[in-house]
Image (tube, grey):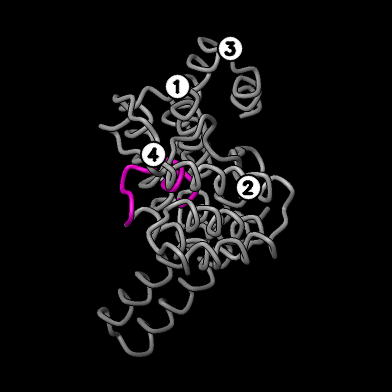
């Protein structure tokens, strides 16, 4: 019904083109009106398609499972480095923030992150945690700012890329979301994080489904399903079947 209404609007716009041609005999002005009418039609048609597809293709709003510590880079995951007091303290702080995020205690998270940043402005997990908390609250611009800072501090932090994809997706900036999901996927593959790889494929498939690129969407969902089955990830399998 919505598409039919758009076609009717396009026909109405074309009516004014005919009037311009009759009264002014201006082909140039008529062509401008035709161009503007078609652009508006395609813009509205794309919006209708995306809104309809959003109901059918689900995005995994959870973080990548089996998180890679922000203290590690891709190369460092191949090493077995002993931890020192500072790393142990950071690990304790990470665990505390993970618990607060699960419980949606946003005020406590903000206090904890602010306190941590005052002490160590280069602690990537503080920016990531605050960014993730902002996503849960629907504060997507603030989330993007925090997650970009986390990535600036550690470009190999896969989970930050993944959540930045979520934030852009929530704003309807689908191609920016794809960019960050693909980067998260590259890192997940490099470090052998199969659950993270599956999560990235699931969300990439969801985004392409929303955009109406069904062949690519199905391809990504099938890859996600294959990995989920191979590693025994039942929750991941369920998400793939839902899409």
**Number of callouts:** 4
Residue drawn where x is 46% and y is 34% of the image: 200
As measured in the structure, the alpha-carbon distance from the residue carrying label 4 to the one carrying label 2 is 24 Å
Whether pointer 4 and pointer 1 mark residues with C-beta atoms closer than 8 Å, the reply is no
Q: Nearer the viewer, mark 2 or mark 3?
A: 2
For marks 2 and 1, the one nearer the N-term is 2
- The extreme front residue here reads 85
Residue 158 drawn in magenta? yes
Residue of label 4: 184
Magenta range is 153-164
Q: Majority secondary structure of the magenta segment? A: helix
Residue of label 1: 194
Residue drawn where x is 51% and y is 9% of the image: 230
Residue drawn where x is 43% and y is 70% of the image: 37
Q: Quadrant of residue 27?
A: bottom left
Residue 232 marker: 3
Residue 140: x and y, percent? 55, 63
> Badge 1: how crowded within 10 Å, few (<14), some, or many (20+)?
many
Whether pointer 2 and pointer 1 mark residues with C-beta atoms closer than 8 Å, the reply is no
As measured in the structure, the alpha-carbon distance from the residue carrying label 4 to the one carrying label 3 is 21 Å
Residue 236: x and y, percent? 60, 24
Q: Nearer the viewer, mark 2 or mark 1?
A: 2
Whether pointer 2 and pointer 3 mark residues with C-beta atoms closer than 8 Å, the reply is no
Residue 134: x and y, percent? 59, 61
Residue 3 drawn in magenta? no
Label 3: state its secondary structure.
loop
Label 4: state its secondary structure.
helix
For marks 4 and 1, the one nearer the N-term is 4
Looking at this view, is 3 or 188 the one in front?
Answer: 188
For marks 4 and 3, the one nearer the N-term is 4
């Amino acid at each position: 019904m919505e598409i039919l209404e758009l076609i009717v609007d396009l026909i109405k716009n074309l009516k004014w083109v005919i009037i311009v041609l009759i009264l002014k005999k201006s082909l140039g002005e008529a062509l401008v009106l035709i161009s503007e009418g078609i652009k508006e039609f395609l813009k509205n048609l794309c919006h209708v398609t995306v809104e309809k597809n959003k109901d059918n293709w689900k995005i995994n709003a959870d973080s990548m499972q089996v998180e890679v510590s922000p203290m590690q880079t891709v190369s460092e995951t191949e090493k077995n480095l002993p931890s020192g007091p500072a790393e142990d303290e950071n690990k304790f702080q990470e665990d505390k923030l993970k618990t607060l995020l699960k419980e949606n205690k946003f005020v406590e998270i903000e206090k904890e992150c602010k306190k941590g940043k005052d002490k160590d402005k280069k602690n990537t997990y503080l920016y990531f945690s605050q960014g993730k908390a902002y996503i849960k609250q629907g504060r997507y611009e603030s989330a993007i700012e925090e997650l970009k800072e986390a990535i600036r501090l550690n470009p190999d932090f896969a989970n930050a890329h993944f959540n930045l994809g979520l934030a852009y997706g929530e704003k309807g900036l689908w191609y920016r979301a794809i960019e960050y999901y693909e980067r998260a996927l590259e890192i997940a593959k490099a470090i052998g994080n199969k659950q993270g790889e599956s999560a990235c494929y699931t969300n990439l498939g969801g985004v392409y489904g929303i955009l109406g690129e069904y062949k690519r969407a199905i391809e990504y969902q099938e890859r996600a399903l294959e990995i989920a089955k191979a590693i025994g990830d039942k929750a991941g399998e369920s998400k793939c079947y839902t899409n």
